[in-house]
Amino acid sequence: MIAMENSDFDANLAAAAGDDAQLRAELIASFRQSVAQNVDLLRRARCDGNWEVAAMRLIGLGSSFHAPELVRLAKVAQSSAPGDPVILRQLSHYSESLADKV
């Protein structure tokens, strides 16, 4: 699944940035920052509503960047209890793994 994600994600970046390496790096950095911010919102959520909104934002972000692994993780979060440490750890790991793409 990760190989598929890489190809979907990379194809989406190639379509958006073409051969412009600087633009590609900026898009990845922006995506990573958005993922990290929304994971932080999940981490700070103290009620079902805030947790749900943050999870839905991650689903939308993953969908717009063709990142199916992020969508999958966000859907798991959406069905989990607020503060679930397992999904928060998985999402944090996903966010950190994006540094390797730059």
Image (cartoon, rainbow, N blue to C red):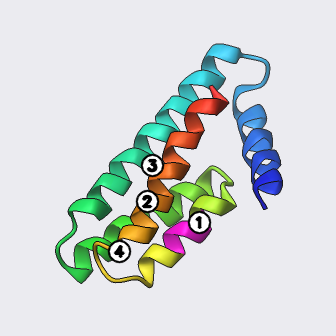
Residue drawn at point x = 34 percent, y = 76 percent:
52
Q: Position of 76 compared to 48: left or right?
A: right
Identify the secondary structure beneath mark 4: loop
Question: Which residue is denoted by mark 2 in the rendering?
Answer: 89
Reply above or below: 93 against 100. Answer: below
Query: Could you say which disc has been placed on residue 84 in the image?
Result: 4
Identify the secondary structure beneath mark 3: helix
Neighbour tally class for label 1: few under 14, some 14-19, many 20 plus, Cα within 10 Å: many
Image coordinates for residue 54, horizontal then vertical, percent: 34, 65
Q: CA distance from mark 2 to mark 1?
A: 15 Å
Residue drawn at point x = 50 percent, y = 41 percent:
96
Of the residues under marks 3 and 2, which one precedes in the sequence? 3
Callout 4 touching callout 3 (CB < 8 Å): no
Of marks 3 and 2, the one in the foreground: 2
Of marks 4 and 3, the one in the foreground: 4
Query: Could you say which disc has been placed on residue 71 in the image?
Result: 1
Of the residues under marks 2 and 4, which one precedes in the sequence? 4
Question: Which residue is denoted by mark 3 in the rendering?
Answer: 35
The residue stretch that appears in magenta:
71-75
Image coordinates for residue 1, horizontal then vertical, percent: 79, 62
Q: Nearer the viewer, residue 50 or 3?
A: 3
The answer, for residue 56, to whether it is visible in the render is no
Which quadrant of the figure has residue 28?
top right
Q: Nearer the viewer, residue 73 or 23?
A: 73
Reply above or below: 61 against 53. Answer: above
Report the predominant secondary structure element of the magenta stretch. Answer: helix
Residue drawn at point x = 75 percent, y = 54 percent:
5
Identify the secondary structure beneath mark 2: helix
Reply above or below: 76 against 55. Answer: below
Q: Nearer the viewer, residue 89 or 60?
A: 89
